[in-house]
Image: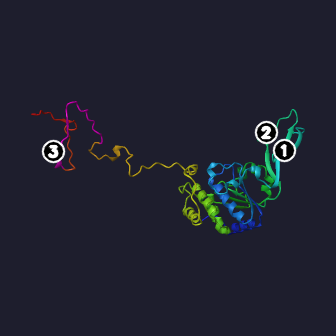
Amino acid sequence: MIQTSSEQIREIQTLVAGAKEIMIALPKSPNADKVATALSLFLALSSKGKQVKVVCTDPMTVEFNQLIGVDKITSVTNSGNGRNLIISFPYQEGSIEKVSYNIENDAFNLVIEPREGYPIITPEVVRYSFGGGNIDLIITIGVASLTDLDSIYQSNQDLFASKPIINIDSQNHNQRFGKVNIVDPSVSSVSEMVLYLFSQLNLVISPDIATNFLAGITIGSQNFTSRETSIITFEAASVCLRNGARRGFSTEQQHLVRPKATYTPSPYTNTMPAQHFARPGISTKVPQTKPKPQGETQFTPFQQPKQQSQQKPQQTTEAPPDWLKPKIYKGSTLL
């Protein structure tokens, strides 16, 4: 059973019900389990009429392309508190000559001209954030500490200090920084935890949500082989399948997080060395025959010696030294 109390569930229900705009934050370099969980929450809360943003400092790469809604995840440049874009960079007194803008080819261009003798402004030093609006609730997924959010937290520390945070994580070293902390290191995946919360919060599990959850559970549990995998893990997977989940994660994506499997030879093919099948007293070496001389014919006896066929299987005798050599029959014709 996921480690939650009835008081925590009631508090989550109150926070979600009272929030109009919700931000779901992922840590830097998230795995597929965390991304799948965030997207499942995004789909469920959006269907309730909430304005939901999923933010992450890192862009989503190809291993997440089969998760539904992955295109809705934005970088730090599209996250933060409000609708007004704020562009920040280091400033020295007198270093800016002029700030202007122009509109060209349906694009708005902000032009910042540095003063002669001062360094130019490079993209590496520019930071983006939002202001002028209001985020009512923050939900962190798989975040052990707020610094794991990287520039999302660094650029919006006032926001994180003033808004309630629901902290959901399975890492043992989680700092429990939220107003509500759902932290359970005994589970195999964060997806498994949040799927359980869905049942407690009466959130609908659509086929798309079930598909994301199943992918997260599969990846998080290392294809159901991790030490934390339990009967709860399999029950969670069955809930996903009953709600229309589609199994779409490829083998290439699964190998990113699961350990390498050891190869087991097929029972229908002999891939083992011959000595593994040898019986005591019987050689497994293949006899080498000499090439057949020209003008001579090779004779293979078609009848075993009578005394040999009567030997008991348990008794073994040394074969004559010439037994394996080709037998040559020489003769002449009378024609």
Q: First in sequence: mark 1 or mark 2?
A: 1
Badge 2: few (under 14), some or many (20 or more) residues near its Cα, within 10 Å? few
The residue carrying mark 2 is 122
Q: Is residue 16 left or right of residue 287?
A: right
Query: Which residue occupies 78% across, 41% down?
Result: 125
Q: Is residue 284 left or right of residue 82?
A: left
Q: Are marks 3 and 1 in contact (CB under 8 Å)?
A: no
Badge 1: few (under 14), some or many (20 or more) residues near its Cα, within 10 Å? few
| Residue 308 is a magenta residue | yes
The residue carrying mark 3 is 305
Q: CA distance from mark 1 to mark 2?
A: 14 Å
Q: Is residue 122 left or right of residue 316?
A: right
Q: Is residue 280 left or right of residue 231?
A: left
Give the magenta part as a residue range: 284-311
Looking at this view, is 321 or 72 the one in front?
Answer: 72
| Residue 48 is a magenta residue | no
Q: CA distance from mark 2 to mark 3?
A: 94 Å
